[in-house]
Image (tube, rainbow, N blue to C red):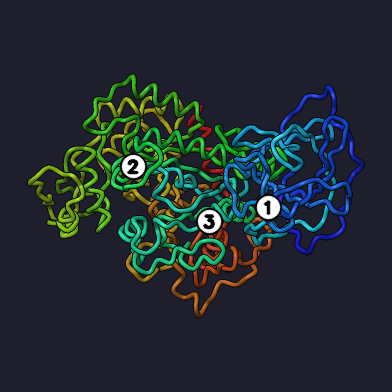
Amino acid sequence: MRRTLLAGAVALIVVAVPTAAPAAESWSPAYDLDNACVALQAFNGSTSLGYLNRNGAGGYGFTATRASAEPFRFDATALGRYTMRDSTGAYAYQSVIGFVMTGSSYGDRADWTVSRAGGSYKVVSTATGQQLGSYLGGVGAGSATLTTGTATGCSTTPEVATGVSGTAAPGVTAAGKLNGWIDAHAHVTAAAAFGGEMHCGEAWDPGGVTVAQAGCPSHATLGVGAVFEAIIGGTDPIDSAEDGWPTFGDWPQPESLLHEQSYYRSIERTWRSGERVLNALLVGNRVICELYPLRETSCDEMDQVRVQYQYLKSMQDYVDAQSGGPGLGWFRLAKTPADVRRIAAEGKLAVTIGVEISELFGCKQTAACTTGAIDAGLDELVAMGVSGLYPVHKFDNAFGGTRFDTGLTGAAVNIGNLVSAGHWWQAQSCTGAHDNEQPIVSDDIARLLALGELDLPAGTIAPVYPSGPICNVRGLTTLGAYLIDKMIDRGLIIHIDHMGVRTAAAVLDRAEAAHYPGVVSVHTWSDRAIVDRILALGGFVATYGFAVTDPGNGEPNFLAEWRANRALPHAATMTGYGVGTDVNGFAQQPQPRLTAATQPFAYPFTAPNGTTVNKQVMGTRTFDINTDGVAQYGLYADWVNDLIGQAGADGPALRQQLMNGAEAYTAMWERARL
């Protein structure tokens, strides 16, 4: 159920005829109150205590007249749980002295668990277990049941609108094919990763947008979060106002990589504009987590996966809670290809689950890893509904070698490899497919080592690399081969990106021998020759969310990457194509197109699924892709349409491949599970 925000002064309250509490009916969670504006009448058994109203003493009391009743706005915080705000916007909260008092902000004691039997409700403090009722003549801890009546004059609920209207085309075509594009690489659970404190902002929060999108003191000027974000994204740690909701003057931006960029209403905007499948990758990195001084959860990478899995399930429940109950929301976890097809047929967004960590199952290179640990780990992930994973991520591990990063990021990750794997990246000159070149001697590594905060052994010396094309000397290990074979047995999707070319080539050898199509490259982190071998297998390819056209800084752009992949020898197998946004993944999002000032993208626009899309407004900030780039996830709706428009004569072909992307990915997954 989409929120309808009601404004205005307190007006006439219309209340249904009260009924006494049921004597024998069973109580079950109440799912019908989200966004309700109601008056509440309390009963002790069959005796009315009166209607709830403000008592002028910072709390609530009872009144005998309907006209004096206080209107309350209910907002869902989870399935069967709500906040109650009065006409002034104050939260009703359970105080430590027994009374229900007024509060200015959301907190645990402003959260209420509500159950229903017939037309009556029980309202219980989620934090304390105390039932709302009569307490020393006022409203407080007691044992009352409540009835509701429609009211007017409720306070408005702050929220982000999608800016999308109209009826979308069906999620499945008449031919039974999925209709829509896929984001094959997104990190919508990043707020719960890296110990839970590095990332400012949430994809969702029980307290709503004012809590989820609030700024963080740790990320303000010269705070530890601001300094880390400056290193990762190049932001200014000195001029960091950190004003989130409602002004958003400081973030989100394409480079604000430690701030939330995928608030759930922004995800809803992309879904309403044609996104059909979102692959949510649970991400983690122990080394980065341990470097950051603030945390509330374990840095163990498998523990980070488990925390994010619960976060993702709770996010689904949160959307359900605002949609009328379990299973009714538009954000649906899909654990099988059949789930994806069913969800698409319902017109909803299918959210698949993947894993992208460096120390999978605790199997860093220096750890004792066994086939038993691999089997147990895969069983755990399959039980979660994980569709695929990265055997190798940023560091060499027990399974194989990584593909090197470049520049300052490469220097930092190489130091991380030293911490995790016990050695610097090791490379030798090679021909043909190769990993990213490294400077012979890295000044960036020397500068980072000089910081002296890494707890490295005394006398650590920076590495020296050959000039020209190089390859990670580490290839697929015996344990790595075992992992790949067991993934094939289980029909799990193998993510090739981040593997060094020697590891990737050996993985593809095994996939080819098994005639296994479940191999993907979905955010432009593989050599082009590797990509062609994936296509030859019947795998799936997506391009990272680069700028639409040449960004003018030497970086690739999406159109050029797509055209290059279309020219590969096995491109005929590419029936659909994907986007890999890497949102919230320490990856800069697309900046405004260089030609946007003279050839601006026009609003409103018609999305590929037929809906009409206006600029998205968050609080007092209006987002425009021409000036903001993809500052937050909702702007991928705009970006996809600009991408198709900028493709010129290739536009129809690109549109067809993008809108068939969800189908191509799902069909590949189905073939892998045969």
| Label 2: which secondary element | loop
* Residue 534 visible within the image: no
- Please name the residue shown 50% across and 38% down the image: 353
Residue 212 shown left or right of residue 430 in the figure: right
Using a 10 Å C-alpha cutoff, classify the residue at mark 1 as few (fewer than 14 neighbours), some (14 to 19) or many (20 or more).
few
Disc 2 residue type?
Asn
Mark 3 or 1, nearer chain start = 1
Q: Nearer the viewer, mark 2 or mark 3?
A: 3
The circle drawn on residue 213 is 3
Which of marks 3 and 2 precedes in the sequence?
3
Above or below residue 332? Residue 373 is: above
Q: In the image, residue 630 lies at what x, y percent? A: 49, 62
- The amino acid sitting under disc 3 is Gln
* Residue 58 numbered mark, or none: 1
Q: Nearer the viewer, residue 653 or 280?
A: 280
Dot placed on the residue nearer the N-terminal end, 1 or 2: 1
SS at mark 1?
loop
Residue 305 coordinates in the image, percent (x, y): 42, 36
Residue to which mark 2 is pinned: 285
Residue at image position (37%, 64%) is 221
Q: Residue furthest left?
A: 459
Going by the picture, which residue comes out furthest to the right? 17
